[in-house]
Amino acid sequence: MAGKLVADAGRNPKPRDISTSALGRRAFLKCAAMAGATCGLSAFALPFPAMSSSARTTQDDSQFTVEAKFYEKLPNKKVKCKLCPRECTVGDRERGYCGVRENHGGTYYSLVHSRVCAAHVDPIEKKPLFHYLPGTLAFSIATAGCNVNCKFCQNWDISQVRPEQVPAEYAPPKAVAEMARQNRCPTIAYTYSEPVIFSEYLMDAADAGHEAGVRSVAVSNGYMQNEALKTAYGKMDAVKIDLKAFTESYYRDVVAGELKAVLESLVALRKMGKWTEIVYLVVPTLNDSDSEFQGLARWMKTNLGVDVPVHFTQFHPEYLLKNLPITPVPTLERAKAIADAEGLHYVYIGNVPGHPAQNTYCPKCRRMVVERLGFTASQMLIRKGACPFCSQAIPGIWHV
Amino acid sequence: MDDGRNKSRRDFLRNCLAGGVVLGARSKFRLLGAVEQTSPPLKSRVAVARDPMLRGTGSAVDSGRILNLLDRVMQTLFELDHPSEPWKKLVRPGEKVGVKVNGLGGRGLSSNVQLVEAICERLQEAGTRASDIVIWDRDTDELERVGFHVVTEGNRVQCFGTDRVGYEDELATYGSVGSRLSKILTQRCDAIINVPVLKDHDGAGVTIALKNMYGVIHNPNKYHPHGCNPYIADLNMLPAIRTKVRLTICDATTACFEGGPGYKPQYSWKENALIVSQDPVALDYTGWRMIERKRAEKGLKPLEAEKRAPSYIATAADAQHRLGTNDPQRIALLEV
């Protein structure tokens, strides 16, 4: 991989230094070759040589093209995508809103299967998943494309482009699973851009991972149709959802999506028994009112329960929202105070290294049970899923 | 000391009054002239030329006849006698010219190769060097598929897609739009001749001049919701587009009244026409009406009844955009 600096979706800003954890292209090639050998895949293809972003002709589109799983055929060679609530009706030779699905003669194709444009080894805390295998690493991958267009996106140069516009490597599912194992990652994370739009690849990679003893997590906006969510995220071991705001107007004006559909996805994930965490990126003046924080906390308590963690994270100016300031820390603390007061048990503050609200505290005895410094879990005191001081159960997936 | 810059308000008024007396009767004449100039609003000229024999006895467009048709429509629009004169008004020697075609519809419904060759011929006659002309769209493979020959070097007319040179790294923004622009537009062209195709569009209603600019950005897929409105108008406000597009020559040799933008033979017709204007909004309005007439002739509902009337045309004409006019009273339609 080209060592592309990327941040997890909904996380902001880009991490200042992840070069030590980024998988270099040389390492990628080595891992891929090893994976090919290990898996015994005679047809295993090595990644392409380095290429410029405009060197589309060096990419073989057919290698990454598979028929989409979630769509309906319509008359006149049109198709209706059933992957996300947008339900794009796509004419022949056209693409959907995400830019990675194309209609060819009435059949709809994903153009991004195994087409990885970013890969890194990240701490799981960077996703952020705080109640999922703390202190472990995630082999994190992305393809180009996204089904929304957040004005604050920090990875817009991969999420808001078409696949042929960014350099990519061929990384078939078994190779990804093997690379995760080689890099001592118990988890594959589908992240950076938007895994909804590469669902077919995500499902195949998750299957390959599970066969190799590697779990999978999705870092997603949750803007997905219910059937697709159940099928694709049913294969995940945990999911982090970026709940961008608690108003439809924000979703319409800033995200180009719909709040209602995301809330339905969150409820569905809980019903499916998937470990779920929520990130709420607090953008000054746009989604930082008391009523929104309170509305969110009350909705979570009623519909998801008090044990679902929520991370109020700091916004940094990016992409199309460069006119707003960094979120003041007191604003994040106000959000946390409101959510705490509503009775949520695990309310975190994100993107503020060293803030005490990055640690996990027992909701019963209030003692610290996981200490974090930046993206590192520096102390992990939970034993058998419980507080070591008062034996209160701490929900999550704590041990490999 | 009076150096002319320290006059009092009283001096200024006195001098103005004196000036009025000196001008005497002449001033009255000039005042009338000024009123005459501003009272009738200037109309946007849209020229439409047809040739029923454009294809002779075959199905392909005849090179000689399309050149002749191009000359007729251009000379009508610019009211000039010689075929190369209109082009001299458009482009100065030494300027680099991009001919932005549309190859999305495949061979059946893309900018006609013979038409584009005719445009390039006239540009060269007007003083533009062949190598200063580039025929382009987003994708080189698409251009080849519709019959253009890819040329990237030498002293010939160039032809390639944005995929060969890429997009600018920085976003260009206006209103709802934030996009990376093709480097062909930003770095290779001083002027653009826009050569769209007259087509129905399942989302936008119609796709003609304004929407053809979706082919100059990296993320057109983001701008299809809500009938592409206000995205199309906002996109055309980007300075690199607004200041460089000098003329639209809409290829209506084969047009599409339903099922667009892809080519479906049952929904296309041979209009054998060219529509030309320097006002892309007026041209889009005119083209839309032509598509509606064909739809009515074929027994189809108006686009409005299908909830896909091209509302972006009115947006492009509104006070915020002022990209042209969609008022038929302010369009001079010149049919030849």
Image (cartoon, coloured by chain):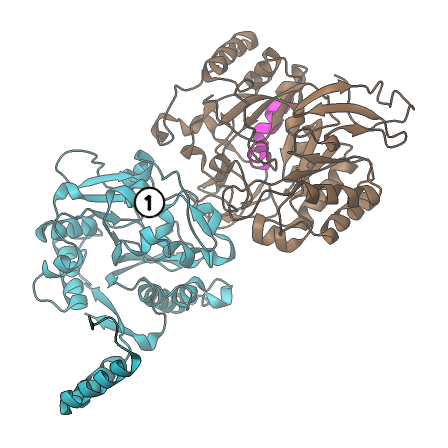
Q: Residue furthest bottom?
A: B25
Q: Which chain is cyan?
A: B
Q: Magenta: predominant secondary structure element?
A: helix
Front-most of residues A21 and B266: A21
Give percent across and percent down for residue B80.
11, 67
Give percent across and percent down for residue B32.
21, 87
Task: Read off the chain for label 1.
Answer: B
Q: Quick check: can you spot residue A68?
A: yes
- Residue A182 vs B81, above or below: the answer is above
Q: Left or right: B181 with respect to A23?
A: left
Give percent across and percent down for residue A65.
47, 30
Q: Colour of chain A?
A: brown
Front-most of residues A138 and A102: A138
Q: Quadrant of residue B260?
A: bottom left
Q: Quick check: can you spot residue A256?
A: no
Quarter the N terminus of chain B occupies: bottom left
Front-most of residues B12 and B253: B12
- Residue B124 vs B158, above or below: the answer is below
User: Residue shown at 59%/30% (left/top)?
Assistant: A191
- Residue A268 vs B46, above or below: the answer is above
Q: Left or right: A355 with respect to B107?
A: right
What's drawn in magenta, residue-wise? A193-206
Quarter the C terminus of chain B occupies: bottom left
User: Residue shown at 83%/39% (left/top)?
Assistant: A306
Residue position for label 1:
B106
